[in-house]
Image (cartoon, rainbow, N blue to C red):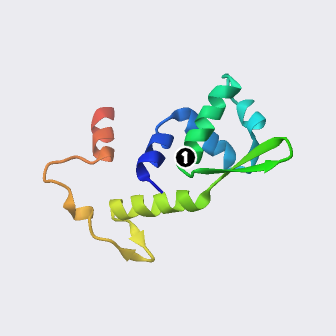
Amino acid sequence: MAFEDTFKALSDPVRRKILTLLKEGIMSAGDIASHFDMTAATVSYHLSILKKADLVFEKKEKNFIYYGLNLSVVEEMMLWLNDLKGAEVDGEKKSGRGNKLRGAKSSSDRRRTSNA
């Protein structure tokens, strides 16, 4: 898996919505397209980017193509992000949380400050 392709695929809100739809189960291209106000060609373009990133797989049956969520890539991405964050893995706290620069604010600190 190339993280560049994965991040590119996840950067678009339409593609994120497609992934959310596929979380419920396998869908045909037409079923996916029915949730959007765009041409079938545009939906196909988004699906091709998701396939290139291995976030979805396709299954051909007769004249239809069905798409499903590739959970192994999603899990690999989550493991990488958790490791980057320094999250707990198997009950052990990974180091990395204390590596924040002195005076640097986390995203939650910035949100609290901007909402005040």
83 vs 51, left or right, is left
Q: Name the residue: 46% across, 46% down.
A: 5
Q: Name the residue: 31% across, 45% down.
A: 107
For the C terminus, the image quarter is: top left
Q: Position of residue 91 (x, y in %)?
A: 43, 77
59 vs 106, left or right, is right
Q: Quadrant of residue 29?
A: top right
**Circle 1 sits on which residue?**
52
Q: Is residue 53 visible?
A: yes
The kind of residue tagged 1 is: Lys
Q: Give above or below for 106 relative to 46.
A: below
Q: Position of residue 80 (x, y in %)?
A: 41, 61
Q: Give above or below for 32 relative to 39.
A: below
Q: Name the residue: 61% across, 44% down.
A: 19
Q: Nearer the viewer, residue 70 or 78?
A: 70
- Residue that protrudes farthest toward the left in the picture: 102
Q: Quadrant of residue 43?
A: top right
